[in-house]
Structures are given as C-alpha cells and as structure tokens.
Image (cartoon, grey):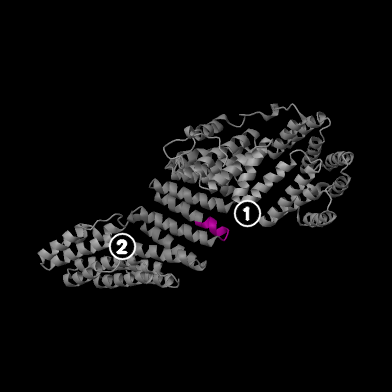
Amino acid sequence: MHSSTSSADFEGPNSQSALPSMVEPKLRSLLSNGPSSTDLQHETAHTARGWLDLAHEAAYADDLERALECASHGLANVGTKAEVALGLYRLVASVHHKLDDEAAMLEAISNRTDLLRTLGQTHQADMEDQLGSILFAEADAFASTVLSGVADQERSSGGVDTVLADVLIGLAVHQMSQMNGEEALELIEEAAALQRRRADAGYHLSAGSLANTEMFLAHLKFMNEQVDAADTLSQQILETGCNRAVRAAMWMMQAVIAHHRNDMPDAASFGVRALELYARLQIRPGAASAASLVASVARRVDRHQLSVLAWKVAVDQAEQGEVEETSGLVAALGHQLLDAGEVTEAEEVLTTLVTREKLSGNHQILAHALIDLGNAVCRQGRYTDAVKHWRDSIDAFLKVDAVREAARTSLGAGMKLVEADDEKIFADAEELMRQAVEMAKASEDPAVETQGLRELAKLLCDQTKPEGLALYDKAIELAGNDEVRYVAAELTRQKAHAYQLFGKNNKAVATALTAADMFEDEAELAMGHGCELMAGKFLIEDSKWLEATTLFTTIAEAEGIQPELRRAALLGLSTALRGQGEHHDSERMKQQAQRIEVETPLPTEHEFSADTVFDD
C-alpha cells in the first residue's frame, strides 16, 4: 500500500500498533481552528479546468450557489477545451436540477448537446436531449425501467457514439440503493471500460468523468471483497490529476483498506489525510466519517484519549454540516469517554444527548445513550440514578418493539448492580434480571434467557435463597436443548458451588462429578478434571479423607491430564493423606507435586491448586 509516512513518524517500538505522531496535533488543530479555518469563497483558479474542480468540490460540499459561481467562471474561460466545457455544462444542469430550476437545467443540457453535435457525437446528443435529468438524477423504479430499456438498445447498436456509460452509472446507483452490490459492480465495470474505449477512440468525455466512475468502481470492488483490486485502483486514482474531493474519497478508501488489513498506522495516516481534505472543502459528512475511522483505529490500539479527541472532531464536523448522523456520533463520543475513564464528562455529553433525543423521538439512539448514561452514574456510585436511566432505556427499546435489546439491557443492568457488591441494591438487580428472563422468553431468545436464569440463580444462591437452586435447574434444562452441552456443563459446575454455599456437600460433590462427566463428553478434559478437583475439595472440607484420597489418586493418574491439574491433584492427595494421619506419604505427594514444572498456568488454576485450599 502506498504510504508517505516514515519510521520517524511513529511512536514507540512497534510500528504495527503505534500510530503516526502527527495524528494528535492534526486532530487538535482541526478542533481548535473552528469552522472558519478555511474560507473557500476566496479560492480561485487560473484555468477552466481548475474552476471545474472547484465547482465539483463545492457541489460535493452541497454548496450549490458556490458550485454555480465556479462553473460560471469556468465557462467564461473555457475557450476550446471541449472536455472541460462538457463537464461544466453537466455540472450546471445537475445543480439546477437539485435547485428545482427546470428552465436553467434544460438550458444547460441544450448547451451541452449543442456542443456534442459540433464534436460529431450526434447520437449521444440526441439521447441526452431525450433523457434529460434522468441521466444525473438518482433513479427511482420508473427511471430505472427507462434506463434499462435504453441500455439494451445502446448495447445492441454496438456504437461508440453512445450514451450507454451514463446510463449504466445511473442503473448502478439504483442497484446500490437496492443493496445489490454485485449487480452495481458489473454495471460500473462495464461503464468504466466503455469510457476508456471511447477516450481511446478519440471521443470527448466530460473532464473528470472517468476519475469519478473509477472512484465509484473502487468503492464497489471493496464492498464486493475485491480488496486488492480496490487498493490498486484507488492508488492509481490518487496518482492522476483528480480534484480534491475525489482525492479525499480515495484517501478514505485507502484508510478503510488499511483498517481491514489490520494495519492501524496506515489506517490512521490515510484517515487523517482524508479528514483534512474533507474539512478544508467543508464536506462535513466525509470529514465526520474520516474522523470516526481515526477514532476507531485509536480505540483498537488502546489509545482511548486519542479516540476521544477524534470523536470530538467527528462531532464538531457533523454539527457544522448539520449531518443527519450527528446524534449517533455524540453517542459514540459519550461511550468512548466512558472507556477512557472520563465519567464526569461522559455524563455531561450523554445528558445533553438524552435531553435532545427525548424531544426528537429517536428511540434507538435514546436507548443506547441512556445505557451509557446509566453506566456513567453507576461508576460514580449513584445507583438509584443508574437504575432510572437503565429502566428508561428499556422503555425506549420497547417503544420500537426492540424486545430482545430491552431484555439484554435489563440483564446487563442487573449484572452491573451485582458487580457493585452493595446489598442495598440487590433487590433492584433481582427485579431487572427477572424482567430480562421474561422478555427473553417472550422474544424467543434462549441465549439471553439462559444467561438471565444463571445470573439470577447465582444472585439468589449467594444470598442463600433456595429459589436459586431451582433456577439453576431451569437454566440447565434450557441449555440442554443445545446440541453442544458445554453451557449446560458449566451451569452444572456452578450449581455444585451453590450446593456448597447451602452446606449440602454431598449434593455438591455429586453435582461436580456430573459436571465433570458432561465436560468430558464434550472433549473438554481440562474442565472435567477441574470439576473432579472441585469435588475433591468439597470432600476435604467435609473431612471425608478416604473418599478424597481415592478421588485425587484417580485424577492424578488420569491419562492426558495437564501438568498443572496433576500438580493440584497431588496437593489434594497430600492433604487427604495428612487428614488420615499418613504424614510420610502426605509429604511424599507434596514433594512430587512441587517437582512438576508448569509452563503456562490455567487461568482458573488458583481455584484448585492453591495450598490454602488443601489446608486442614
């Protein structure tokens, strides 16, 4: 991939994770310079082609009056440059169509077709006169039918004096609106090939039209997973004399490709290039999108404060352009502030967003913002406020019939409250979890229903409420419907722990051994041996030394047991032997355990092998 950054631009020893050092100062500059950092009204060109580029850039920024002004300057200086004049007339017609000025649009089309006729492209001129605005307006179902008929007719004629390329582009745009990416790609590939063939045959194309078509083609290739081809084409476009709006789009394409390839330094570098160009041209949606990508890259490499800064730039650009997605970007900023530990600022940002979205009625964004707002105040120990925000979020989801999202939110809220380890809010946690289970059941979401039953069971068992044991049974039964029994086995393991909390050690041992069998049926031998060790631990706690000795001996001699688990079994056996008064054999087992070298301890090893577990 093309890159102009040097190794000196990167921070830290690992260029695969470090980001270019210029990213942060450039983001800060964009944020501090504000909306008037560039006055495009004062930009001028020395040639008609330069004015055409400025006109295109203004049109991309939706500054239609500026686009017409630049086009007017271009036409006054066009001279004999036919390709530039064709591009200017097409742009003027398109802008007047957007402004609903049909008379001015038809005049521009007429001027363009008159020029085409003087160039000898009479059939193209006749067809453009017939089709009018259909060629550059986004095609609806009716226009798409018309264009399909014209495409068939033009293909059958096989001529190079044709309007087919523009027709194919219109059809591709329509296919994209219908989410038909493969069909759109085929149409644009045909259009680009035809434009190149016409140029090679000496026909006059609108200046910049091939670059615009190839820009569309690069995007479609990426969308259709032709990543290498999209990369090559976007680099080729950047190496040609395209206008800055096209360059910004292609730098963005390069950034997206780098992100796709997990090359975060290049993704950040190219994303900032796109961002700067878009911001300079006041193409606010593009700038917001580029800043969002940089924010995502920074988050991926754990640069949370840098990600916050990039999201702030994205929000600033979106607000300047009154971009439709502004609320979603503010929500992302609030979420990233939480990840960065800036809970107070996150609360301020999200509170403002929630107030705004309650008025606008966008329940999806409101619901997600309320979740994060609840998290922000929860981290500050304000649990009552958190519960209110989470319940409001659930209500917002239910207003748009998003029952599954509501169930997940209710479960997540209950779990957050349990994490706070404050018995005063356990009642709220229990209520939210019960609600989650009911909503998951109603929306036929067995995964959330199972998890809800598990979390509720654990909460109740930790408070020694017998209902928790029954809920474990429900969760195990529900999980048992899955062909993969891993979840049911894990729930059975947790139920064994619960029995031990209630002092029911015999049931705890039996349940732990049942879980071991279930894990071993799933070829999860390590988890199975772990459950057997847990059963041995329960036997030791009950002073059942003989049974513990037998079980730990069996585990230690098991074929294929991992070294760390064998060591734990030998330590358990040592403790059981000591309990029977066999101190010599106990010491021998302990020494045997200590001779086992463990290269990579299991994450849960401490649960089984800590010496304190097997003390008398």
Relative image position of residue 245 (x, y in whole percent): 67, 38
Task: Give the prevailing secondary structure in the magenta stretch.
Answer: helix
| Viewer-side residue, 455 vs 62 | 62
Q: Are marks 1 and 2 in contact (CB under 8 Å)?
A: no
Relative image position of residue 38 (x, y in whole percent): 63, 29
Q: Is residue 359 above or below residue 4?
A: below
Q: Is residue 302 visible?
A: yes
| Viewer-side residue, 279 vs 562 | 562
**Residue behind mark 1:** 224
| Viewer-side residue, 425 vs 591 | 591
* Residue 134 shown left or right of residue 272 in the figure: right
Give me the residue at 68% from left, 48% from top. 217
Q: Which residue type carries mark 2?
A: Gln
* Secondary-structure class at tag 1: loop
* Residue 106 shown left or right of residue 438 in the figure: right
| Viewer-side residue, 391 vs 343 | 343
First along the sequence among labels 1 and 2: 1
| Figure quadrant of residue 53 | top right
Relative image position of residue 307 (x, y in whole percent): 49, 41
**Residue behind mark 2:** 463
Q: Is residue 207 above or below residue 36?
A: below
How dense is the environment of label 1, judged by Cα within 10 Å: few (below 14), some, or many (20 and up)?
A: some
Q: Which residue type carries mark 1?
A: Asn
User: How many angstroms separate mark 1 from mark 2 (CA)?
Assistant: 54 Å
Magenta span:
394-401
